[in-house]
Image: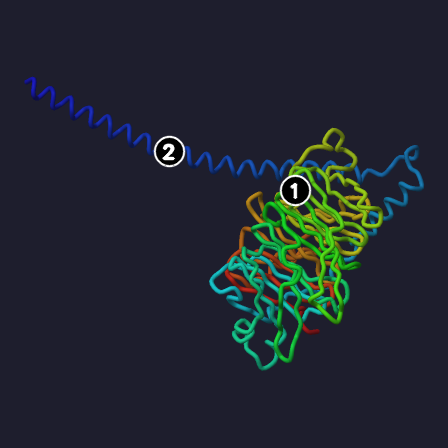
Amino acid sequence: NIVNMDLLGDIGAADQLTSTRAENKVLKERVQYLEQRCKVLTVENEVLKAEVEIYRNEAASLRPPTTEEATPADTNKVQTMNEDFVKGGDGVYAKSKEVLLENLHGVSNISCCSLSNDDSTLATGGADQMVALCEWGKAFGTEGTETIVQTASRVSCGAPVIAIDFARKGHNTKFLAAGCMDGSVHVIFYEKIGKELQAIEVSKGTIKHTKYVRTLAWSSTDNMLATASADGCVQVHKLEWNLLDSSSVKMEKLQTLQLPGSVESLCFHKDHLCCYARGSPCLMYFDLQDNFAQQKINLNQGPGNAGFDEHVSMCIMDMAPYGDYLALAADTSRNIIIDFKTGRQIRNLYGHQNDGFSQPKIAWSKNGQYLYGNTQEGPVVCVWDIASSSIVDRLEGHSNVVRDMFSSNTTDTLVTTSFDKKTQLWLAPAV
């Protein structure tokens, strides 16, 4: 009897242990679900907070001033607001898939792309630590895309390349810059000799950051290069060279700017350098004609936002200038069009998904009527009609999320690169 009781006790304990393990498994699955749901709600909450601020701005701006409040300046401001992007787009933008270049960087991902001023030369940077340059237009001739990929000119940078741009002043400035994961910036000279495109690094080791390079850009009014890093530093250099001897290139440092956080995006706009540092509620403008004098543009500005000036509801991950405007890509599934001079928000563009773990990218169409942008929810390029603030097209040409894009201001040409290791060139359909 004692043996039977012990046996029954052991069986009972085993059953209890099995039951407890089953309950623990169920609880762990429930915890994992709740953690995932919490992350989703956190992102949705940030979006809702941003929308609340937008509604405040819109409600305040739509209220016409009373007779006592109205001034000539107010009247002029209302007229100006009504003149921004009134006409809908004319349907002309890059949407036709024309050239597809596969595996420009072999089995490695392509992280960035750019076109030269005359659109003839394509440059890409990848995880294989290389910059690749090719004349993509040859695809319309006798050369196939495989030959273009195989004969591309390549320059080793010693670290994964994550940002790239061509010098923008004039058509004879045959330089580009590449920013890398190890904080180095490489200036490359390229030229066509015979039928081949050749490239070589110049002024080696001149520009170096202590952390990885987040972004870089050339000025279109001067041979000025700005590079920004996760170390919070922006370095500004000026390119000097002899047209007859490219080997005499010199990068003269003009200024070092220390911002309060990782510099996520920057661009040149006329005589200003515009930057955004993570954790800041403001864009920072630096006047190139006034010894880099600083001006802050609060992203929370506007009637109805009293007490919210220091609130940080988003991070500006990319920016693109066009005329008097600046487009901003935020990590809260939101793109914004602002008046560059005043910072006034003119349009807010939604319908895509880009959260804090994404890499939002944007670019203007040549005519300034449309904005291209990526989305983390799929391998497409969203196209917004800015006047109506609505998505009018989703360009399908990749099999994975779009990593970077570049739109020409010379022709209706759009370049996109993706984690599918493909580079797609889009053109406006022939009329």
Look at the image and tell me whether residue 229 can be seen: yes
Q: Is residue 223 left or right of residue 73?
A: left
Rounded to the nearest angstrom, the CA distance separating label 2 from label 1 is: 40 Å
**Other residues around mark 1 within 10 Å, as few (<14) / some (14–19) / many (≥20):** many
The C terminus sits in image quarter = bottom right
Residue situated in front as seen by the camera: 351 or 251: 251
Look at the image and tell me whether residue 352 can be seen: no
Identify the residue at the far left of this view.
1
Q: Is residue 281 left or right of residue 102?
A: right
Name the amino acid type tagged 2. Lys
Please name the residue that numbered disc 2 is placed on.
28
Q: Residue 355: x, y in percent? A: 58, 44
Nearest to N terminus: mark 2 or mark 1: 2
Tag 1 secondary structure:
loop
Identify the residue at the far top of this view.
2
Please name the residue that numbered disc 1 is placed on.
232
Identify the residue at the far bottom of this view.
142
Residue at position x 85%, y 48% in the image: 80
Tag 2 secondary structure:
helix
Name the amino acid type tagged 1. Gly
**Other residues around mark 2 within 10 Å, as few (<14) / some (14–19) / many (≥20):** few
